[in-house]
Image: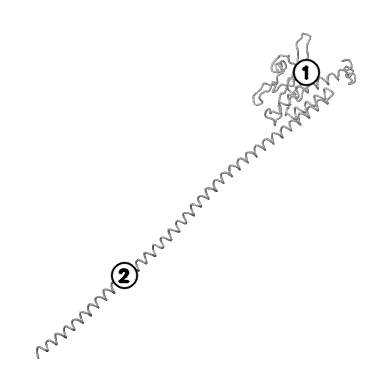
Amino acid sequence: MVEKADATSWEAYASRSLTVQREEFLETFFKRGAEFTNELLGEVHELQGQLRTLRDDNAALRLQLASDDAIRDLLVKIEALEKEKRSLATHIESAKQESFDYNSRYHEVELELDAMANLYVASYQLHIALTPSEVFSIMEQILMQFIGVGRFAVLLRRNTTGGESVLEPVHMFHCDGLAVRAVKGSEGIIGESVSTAVYYLGDPTERREAGAPLACIPLVFGQTVIGVVVVYEFLEQKTGFVNMDIELFRLLGSHAAAAIAGAGLLAKVGDVFVGLDEYRRV
């Protein structure tokens, strides 16, 4: 009976032990499975977080690349605009220079037209003068208004019996206080200008002796020098010679000489018709 009881107890113990072991195994298995699952879930969450980070980084990189492309495009466009700006600036400068050249040329043309008008008026006035006083009066206007002469004298050539020529003053303009005298045909600056038929132009800024000429304008009639216009001073506002002065001096040198000679001959015959009779004898 004892043996039977022991066998029964052993079987019960063995059966309970197997159950416990089974439960413990299952508990351990599921616990490990749960832990492994949790670990897997944690890794999945971590991987998902990394994936999101990678996606965000990828999106940021895409935006950065797009931004870089936009910046490159913008820089290219800016460079093109700068190039266009430089081209326009060059064109504007060229246009400004052309406009400046045009204005300068226009001003030069105006001066040339004004000079031509002055020359025409001066020439016309000289040729309508019939008496020496009219000729000298017109010469005064030309020298004072067109050139700016303040003092001058007209000296005419006279041949002496000895064959030597003398330049005698026949008309003076504001020469009070100046010792204007007759000059030998080859004496000093005045005589040299007459003997060579060459203009003399001095420097207004240099100091000169009292009565020294500032300019000498030979009066040439045909091939003969009949006298000289001696300029002593400019008007206060005039500081020097300009190109227009030279042209007017040339006009006076020839046209005034012809006007003086013509008025003198007319005064000598006393009647224009008497003078015209000379043409019938030619």
- The one of 174 and 126 positioned closer to us in this rendering: 126
- Residue 214 left/right relative to 37: right
Query: Taking 8 as reference, is 234 above or below it?
Result: above
Query: Taking 9 as reference, is 201 above or below it?
Result: above
- The one of 51 and 216 positioned closer to us in this rendering: 51
The quarter of the image holding the N terminus is bottom left
**SS for dot 2:** helix
**SS for dot 1:** loop
Q: In which quarter of the view is residue 35 placed?
A: bottom left
Mark 2 or 1, closer to the camera: 2
- The image position of residue 174, as x and y in percent, is 75, 25
Name the mark on residue 133.
Answer: none
Residue type beneath disc 2: Leu
N-terminal of the pair, mark 2 or mark 1, is: 2
The residue at the point 90 percent across, 20 percent down is 273
Q: In which quarter of the view is residue 217 placed?
A: top right
- The image position of residue 112, as x and y in percent, is 72, 32
- The image position of residue 226, as x and y in percent, is 77, 17
Label 2 and label 1: CA atoms lie apart by: 129 Å
The quarter of the image holding the C terminus is top right
Q: In which quarter of the view is residue 18 placed?
A: bottom left
- Residue 178 left/right relative to 66: right
Mark 2: few, some, or many residues within 10 Å (few <14, many ≥20)?
few
- The image position of residue 76, as x and y in percent, is 51, 49
- Residue 113 left/right relative to 4: right
Name the mark on residue 222.
Answer: 1
Which residue is identified by label 2?
Answer: 40
Residue type beneath disc 1: Gly
Query: Taking 211 as reference, is 75 above or below it?
Result: below
The residue at the point 68 percent across, 35 percent down is 105
Mark 1: few, some, or many residues within 10 Å (few <14, many ≥20)?
few
